[in-house]
Amino acid sequence: MSRTPASSQPPSTPGEGDLIPFQGLIDLVTYHDDRSLYTVLKVVPEKGYDVPVDGELFGPTRITAVGKTMEPNEGARVRLWGRWGRHKAHGAQFEFERLEPLLPTDEKGLVRYLSSKAFFGVGKVTAQRIVDVLGTDTLDRIANDPLCLKGIRGLRPGAADTLRETLADQVVMHRSLAFLLGLGLATHQARAVIERYHAASEAEVRKDPYRLAAIGGIGFATADRTARSLGIGEQDPRRLKAGLEFSLQESADDGHSCRRIDTLLEETTERLNLPHSIQAELAEALQ
């Protein structure tokens, strides 16, 4: 495998086939663009995630992973979904389409995580002291016991409060991102949802996934697919209402300032692939 740092240029298109998981620790963020989200990572694989090199499997070593993700942090555990590929200049690399953040579970990972840029004011020495006192249950104890950080040398009371609040936000964001990516949203779409709903992202999407249609870069088709994956039926009132709103918006975008109700109902029925007998329920959804 090539040890040469990866280029900041996007890799060649991965081959066809199902995505496979690859799990490990981000050792280095080689490149990250905040606008395009294109990212190059050096990842240390976890046990059981072997690295194929020239047709053979090798044990843990630092590998190059490339793809799009938001705010990667060195020291973070991640699960990547993608395919093994080969860059013409830099050799084998894992080309991921989805990155799911995972919370660290061992002491070394906890120290790197707490001393990362995600937690302002906590350096490596202080992070080590926290982990030495709280052990591998550090994150759970910080989240559930407001007094557990009291007495940690070098950690001021204000910094302890900030650490606890930031950790709570990080945990929620991690769970929200994993949930949204699990629904099939692209990373940039998931980021848009989190920017809109913050910690309430999962609750809001579960309540009414058709709210996604109003977020730039997602649209009705993706919202409809997401709703179906969450068990919302074809004739659910939320789907009918969203379908009508989409038809109205599409008409407005085409320059129509007024639509006959019967025409609107007909268009929406066809768009949602529903029987014509549903038009009474559609009309009721207009109220």
Image (cartoon, helix red, strand yellow):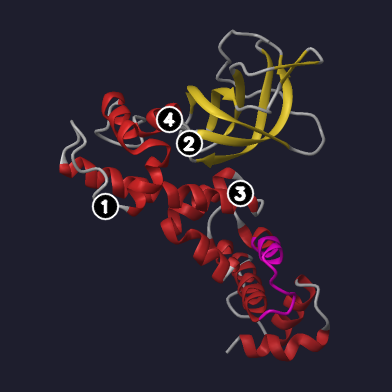
Q: Is residue 153 left or right of residue 282?
A: left
The magenta stretch spans residue 213: no
- Are the residues flagged by discs 4 and 1 in contact, CB closer than 8 Å? no
Q: Secondary structure at mark 2?
A: loop
Residue at 61%, 49% (x, y): give it. 181
Q: Which residue is mark 1?
A: 146
Q: Secondary structure at mark 4?
A: helix
Q: Earlier in the sequence, mark 3 or mark 2?
A: 2
Q: Separation of disc 3 and disc 4 at Cα?
A: 28 Å
Q: Earlier in the sequence, mark 1 or mark 3?
A: 1
Name above or below for residue 45 compared with residue 163. above
- Local crowd size for mark 1, using a 10 Å CA cut-off: few (<14), some (14–19), many (≥20): few
Q: Which mark is residue 181?
A: 3
Quarter of the image that includes the N terminus:
top right
* Residue 117, horizontal then vertical, whole percent: 35, 32
Amino acid type for the residue under numbered disc 2: Pro
Q: Which mark is residue 207?
A: none
Q: Nearer the viewer, mark 1 or mark 3?
A: 1
Residue at 55%, 64% (x, y): give it. 205
Q: Separation of disc 3 and disc 2 at Cα?
A: 20 Å
The magenta stretch spans residue 229: yes
Q: Which residue is mark 4?
A: 107
Q: Quadrant of residue 113?
A: top left
* Residue 152, horizontal then vertical, whole percent: 21, 36
Q: Secondary structure at mark 3?
A: helix
Amino acid type for the residue under numbered disc 3: Leu
Q: Earlier in the sequence, mark 2 or mark 1?
A: 2
**What range is drawn magenta here?**
223-236
Q: Is residue 129 left or right of residue 44?
A: left
Q: Which residue is mark 2?
A: 104
Q: Separation of disc 4 and disc 2 at Cα?
A: 8 Å
Q: Earlier in the sequence, mark 3 or mark 4?
A: 4
